[in-house]
Image (cartoon, rainbow, N blue to C red):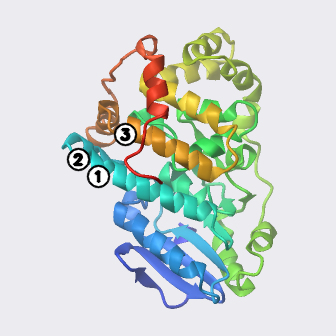
Amino acid sequence: MTTSTPNTTNTTPAAGSANVLVSAAGGLGRITLNRPAAINALDHAMILAITRQLDAWRTDDTIRAVLLTGNGERGFCAGGDVRAMARDSREGRPQGTLAYLRDEYRLDRLIASYPKPVVSLMDGIAMGGGIGIGGNASVRVVTERSRLAMPETRIGFAPDAGGSFLLSRAPGQLGVHLALTAGTMTGADAIGAGFADVCTASERLPELVEALQADGGQDPQAVARAFAAEPPPSPLAAERAWIDACYAQGSVLEILDRLRSRAETAAHEAAEEILRHAPRAVSVALELVRRARSLPDASSALEAEWRMASGLAVLPDFVEGVRAQLIDKDRAPRWDPARLEDVDADEVERILATAPPEPL
């Protein structure tokens, strides 16, 4: 993958993690995720190492912009290390799960509010926690190979890492659709949904990196836009009419009824997909994204997600979802409750209002 083009000078492992590489050249600090066998999924040490590096560069006058890339052939970042989190919860150590999420969200907030431009190259797969670090950057680049998603409802969780804020800002009801179905976006979809700013040809990414270094971090947004290519038509935008009509309904059950009533095959497929996901998590996701619409910024959304995660990540559905999707891979999770009709609305409210173990 072209995002794995080596740094041209002084590449070293970041303090605390060999899975993060750092370099600096011409005013541009570069952070490269270096765990390609796991599609650069973020383990806890990586999160802390990236945070430390960004903190160091924040006051370094020789660094005027930061570039985030990922090594390997498959993508930028597949997300957070949910296997480790689920293991902690399964073995009676929920504090480990929550410590990971706390530090992940702190990193996402740091990127979203960073005082210097942050450029992310989300070539290939960028999902979940990968959206957290890439989608919260100030200049977000995708390609024809990009595949972006917030797939949390598949594993008994809800969109986080700032994802609820991005979903809430998508046109119409696209964000609700993506949250409930855990749908995947192309690069063109990501541009239209507000998850990315520039689409460029993957073969030009090495040139883009060289241009960013030559620019010295003066105006990385202008540099990135100079490499912009007209994205192809967005498959997601083409479905906007029925998506807006269906997902404006009040509850998940009402959304499902409207999806089933439509003539479009894609609407019926969306209903089937939602029914495969954890009923409690889907219900939480709907409320989380809708409430994020009234929040002023990503930092506020991360605070809301931290409350949600403190209530939802320690429940059995999260462990079961990770087991079914990523460990045993039988794709047959046993959710509890198993039906949307049995989800307790008061419990959804309690989850969204959970008091976290400590402030974010």
247 to 359, vertically: above or below:
above
* SS at mark 3 in the image: loop
User: Does the rendering let one see residue 161?
Assistant: yes
Across and down, in percent, residue 339 comes to: 41, 14
Give the numbered dot on residue 96: 1
Query: Callout 2, which amino acid?
Result: Arg
Which residue corresponds to mark 2? Answer: 93
Give me the C-alpha separation between circle 1 and circle 3. 11 Å
| Amino acid type, mark 1 | Gly
Q: Quadrant of residue 167?
A: top right
Specify few, some or many for label 1: CA neighbours under 10 Å numbering under 14, 14-19, or 20 or more: some
Q: Nearer the viewer, residue 261 or 287?
A: 287
User: Which quadrant of the structure image shows residue 266?
Assistant: top right
Nearest to N terminus: mark 2 or mark 3: 2
Asked if the residue under mark 2 is in contact with the one under mark 1, i.e. CB atoms within 8 Å, the reply is yes
Q: Residues within 10 Å of mark 3 (few under 14, many from 20)?
A: many
Provide the secondary structure element on which disc 1 rests: helix
Query: Gap in Å between the C-alphas at discs 1 and 2?
Result: 6 Å
**Side of 167 relative to 229 (left or right):** left
Query: In the visual, does 315 lie left or right of 198?
Result: left
Q: Quadrant of residue 114?
A: bottom right
Name the foreground residue: 302 vs 253: 302
Q: Which residue is mark 3?
A: 313
Q: Is residue 106 above or below residue 27?
A: above
- Residue 354 locus on image (x, y percent): 43, 36
Q: Nearer the viewer, residue 12 or 107?
A: 107
**Distance between the alpha carbons at the discs numbered 2 and 3:** 12 Å
